Amino acid sequence: MIRYLALRLLGVAGVLLVICAATFTIFYVFPADPALQACGKSCTPERLAMLHHQMGLDRPLWRQFTDYLTGVLAGRTYGDGPHAVQCHFPCLGFSYQNDTPVWDLMMDRLPTTLSIAAGAALLWLAGGVAAGVLSALRKDTLLDRAMMVGTLTSASLPVYFTAMTLMVLVVQIGGLLPYSSYVPIGSDPVGWAKNLVLPWAALALLYAAMYARLTRASMVETMAEPFIRTARAKGLPERTVVVKHGLRAGLTPVFTVFGMDLGALLGGAVITESVFGLPGLGQLTIDAIDKSDQPVVMGVALLAAFFITFANLVVDLVYALLDPQVRYA
Amino acid sequence: MSALPLTPGRHAAPPPAGRSPWRLAGARLRHDRAALLGLAIVALFVLMALAAPLLTALNGHGPNEFHPEKIDDALAGAPRGSFGGIDAHFWLGAEPGTGRDVFSRMVYGARISLLISLLATAVATTAGTALGLTAGFAGGRTDLLISRVMDLVLSFPQLIFMIALVSVLPEANRTLELVLVMGFFGWPYIGRIVRGQTLSLRNREFVDAARATGMTRRRIVFHEVLPNLMAPVLVYATLTIPVNIGTEAALSFLGIGVRPPTASWGQMMSKAIGWYQVDPAYFVVPGVCLLLTVLAFTLLGDAFRDALDPRGGNR
Amino acid sequence: MKRPPRTRLALPAALPAVLALAAGALSACDSGGSSGSGGRGGSNGGTLTVLYTKDMEHLDPQRNYVMFAMDFGTRLLYRTLTTYAAASGQAGTKVVPDLATDTGRTGDGGLTWTFHLKQGLKYEDGSPVTSQDVKYGVERSFAPDLPEGPGYARTMLAGGDEYHGPYKDPKGLDSIGTPDARTIVFHLRRPSMEWPQIATLPTFAPVPKAKDSGVDFDKRPFSSGPYRIQTYDRGKRLLLVRNPYWSKATDSVRQARPDRIDVQEGLAQATIDQRLIADQGADQRAITLYSVAASSMARILTRPDIKRRFTSELGLCTRFLAMNTAKPPFNDPRVRQAMQYAVDKDAYRTAHGGSGIGAPAGSYLPPTLMNGQTLDVYHAPPKGDPAKAEQLLTAAGKGAGFSINLTTTSTEQGKAEAEAVQQGLARVRVKVRINPVSNSVYYSTIGDVRKEDELVFYGWCADYPSASSFVQPVFDGNNITPKGNTAVSQLDDKVLNTRIETAVKDGRSADWQGVDQALMQASPMIPLIYDKLPLLRGSKVTGAIGHPIWEGEYDFATIGVKS
């Protein structure tokens, strides 16, 4: 088990390294000289050269890359003399745009994204699984059909369509909720929730529909398994059969997917944040890409990849714990 | 990745290989009303896309033709008239800002949206099948290498990378770029399924038998294994198309779309978002197109899966 | 005087949405909605809410070079040697003393400039503002660590080309003298009568050396203005409260009415517009920091109660379609002249936001720089004159048309503007291929002379109200540089260059209209519109006037809220 874990962690590190290199390549192979942009319109060649030096862009590409990696693993020092700046582990550099450490920028935005993702995930998991189980148990009834048509439609709607519609109906016409802005949960829990209800709803509508479909399929399959028939034959009440035997087996694939979806969402709910104007990681990324703020893009890409790989790891571990048949390979 | 519905089929148990279940499946499909509905919608949109020049000849408005008389310059080009300027000549109204005919743009947009999503699916499917098959059949180091690469690509924060990549690429052929980028991030999903299927087929009796008769490796792959992979590949590909349609729209929404003045549903959607409150009619058109197409392909994919997979056929 | 002071303009890539043009100051009277509650009067106190899409870019005075942020910074957080009168229209272009007792004195025709500081100027901690602090501030703008600010000090001060800022050269720049704590003397490389205007730039805000935190100063500039920063959560919220040591007695410009200024950042413009249209609760005391979305115009202008809260003033800017004269087909002046008739300026303006957002331009210089006078050289109708264009093209041997590329920004609006040009030129068989590039690389893309497309969208705002600061960087062929080029048409005509440089030397007395006319005849660019900035405010905002210097942005010196 320990060996397995170590190997998997090594794998995660490898993935992050490759993603780091890929981001680096994307931005340095294709020309979008950040020094030229910082230099502005009264740019003289001498000044440009000076800025290149200042930003460390005059060094060979591989040196820039190894410097970056060193920074991530051990921290690094920028500049020299009295104006040297110490960037501590995990140093992802400084934003070209506003000289803030990328790590600080991300940690500043993470709570927003975390709040969006966590609330939406709870909603969609509860709603989706409940609907799916109900549908499966009432298979082929009117309820089942209505539910499946509803979820299929809901899953087919683009998230910005849902989001915009919700915003117009609830905020603009209904006046029931304020225009979203992020309020830290610590300072005002009620305000926090009020501001996030719509983003949660928009995301949850999409995902809950998919989860309902997934849960239904998995439950229908499980309930047809021999062990369920055995349980029923033993004379167990239907409730016990469903809850103790059916759900446990039927929901395993749902939780696998859940882990991965949540991991992906933590990297930034790009579209939802952009529609509702919430300052999360997704917005940060879009802005950074728009301004060619490469250190920030690199940082967010790494963080997002970390969440994805980490979620995968957790899912696999939980799987391994639950199911002794899974080999640590 | 919030906008991208979870890639369907990724977790669907692939149907076990059988002896050509195609005819049986065809019969099932003919009685599946949902499948027929999906098929009808898809056919309608494909026809619409193919017949775009004919359809726009009917109303006499090219997709890129400005109609300043349809909009109000003092109001930044809001369409004149109710419901986004719908009238006898502009069946779905006029585009805000330009007065271009929304119907004409919708039918031409169908071409680009369908083209991009179908091609991207084709790229992902071809690459995924080829690599998955290679990995599953060759085993050993090749398998290890390809599997690791698949894991790696799946670990990428895809939307972020798509945006970053497309936004730094020189604007040579945006359609092709979108197809390749979407294809690149899509192939491992199908690659995994194909690899798994191949692994289980590799040691089945009929493959052993073929081997025993001295059939070449090549022949075994193409004549014995590949045909048995077609069912899951078809199901999966069908379910990938709506995801790609959604991705194209999402990328357009985020400002990385086809080169203007080309119309695509994503481009229309992205423009409509800004005008949502003034001209909701303009938002509804691409929205409904996207909804219907995604819905239709999902219905179709589900139906294929049910029809080709007798075990789960009752779900 | 081969390369006189380069008074280039910002068009910072950072300006949201649009090409970042700005400024022009026409008369205030033609702006639809600035009457009513936008007038004088109004009380002190309350909280003004400012809504914005991004963050403030740079608040560090020496790095601040985005029009509205310069307005925000110099009116609220720091004072400069001189500044502009708080007024809209032509009156707003007048330079008045700020930290200094007058607008500067010179005894040698503009080579040496002396300013004396007022008595009783204080920072937010009560310590006095000294001339050494102003000197140190200007020196900071030379540091490569803080590169974003205007380049005037660097190019105009003697010895500026060898000085690299106080971090590398702590002994300072010799051409700035501080004989005593309240006197500062600037020695220029060449005489310039425009120094009092240049001294309005945030470059000339004082920074005490002890408070300089280098790049971190951006997050928490040390205030010499009427407000100080209480909290700044970048990208989310910036909260200003009163600086208790600022004294109205030393300041004839700033009224500093609200008690607090609450900037909410990172909002979608559509949301901002909707909140202001709805005018509920705290939003009644809110303004948008930058241009309302084009798609919101219809909702604003069709309702009189909302239109009353709308302002759209000219800045010192013109938007152009620039032709690359270094490449065929635009190396032929006849083809360029034909284009003046081929372009559909109406369609362009609609895409840009409609008639409320700019006046059609008949020449390059905005009327705000020309005492309100306008010039129309070709008399082409706003929709263009395709027949005339075709005739000219045929005469130039291009009757069969040609294909060209057009660079634009990859925003929805940038694309829409390009489509408008495309359909206009298609009328004379000119095939335009649109090349959208992202905002952040736009200016470096079109400023690369070798890679520049045949057609590019361009725009220029004067940094200060002087025709020379407008014409020279854009039209003087001697200003063409291989990268970061500002003379994007690349027209290098000896006669015109000489004419421009002579006019620059003559300054205000020169015949700028004649220069404009001659340039229009050479036709390196097609003038599209003189820019207005469309702004919306809540019903309880007072003193909201659009200031010509900063694109027509609300003047933060006069703005206040009613209870």
Image (cartoon, coloured by chain):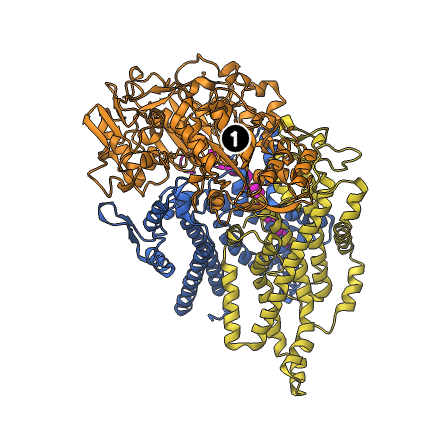
Residue furthest to the left: C180
| Chain identifier of the blue chain | A
Q: Residue at coordinates 56% horizontally, 19% vertically from top-left? A: C32
Packing grade of label 1 (10 A; few <14, some 14-19, many >=20) is some
Q: Residue at coordinates 31% horizontally, 32% vertically from top-left? A: C190
Is residue B240 in view from this perspective?
yes
Quarter assignment of residue C113: top left
Q: Residue at coordinates 53% horizontally, 73% vertically from top-left? A: B143
Could you tell me residue A229's position as x and y percent? 65, 64
Is residue C128 in view from this perspective?
no
| Chain identifier of the yellow chain | B
Residue furthest to the top: C41
Please state, as top left, top right, bottom left or bottom right, where the N terminus of chain C lies in the image. Answer: top left
Nearer to me, C145 or B207: C145
Would you say residue B309 sits in the magenta stretch? Answer: no
Amino acid under disc 1: Ala
Nearer to me, C289 or A273: C289
Q: Residue at coordinates 61% horizontally, 37% vertically from top-left? A: C339
Residue C341 in the image: above or below residue A137: above
> Which chain hosts label 1?
C
Residue C24 in the image: above or below residue B127: above
Could you tell me residue A88's position as x and y percent? 30, 51
Would you say residue A193 sits in the magenta stretch? Answer: yes
Q: Which residue is mark 1?
A: C518
Could you tell me residue C370's position as x and y percent? 48, 22
The boundaries of the magenta stretch are: A184-213
Chain C color in figure: orange
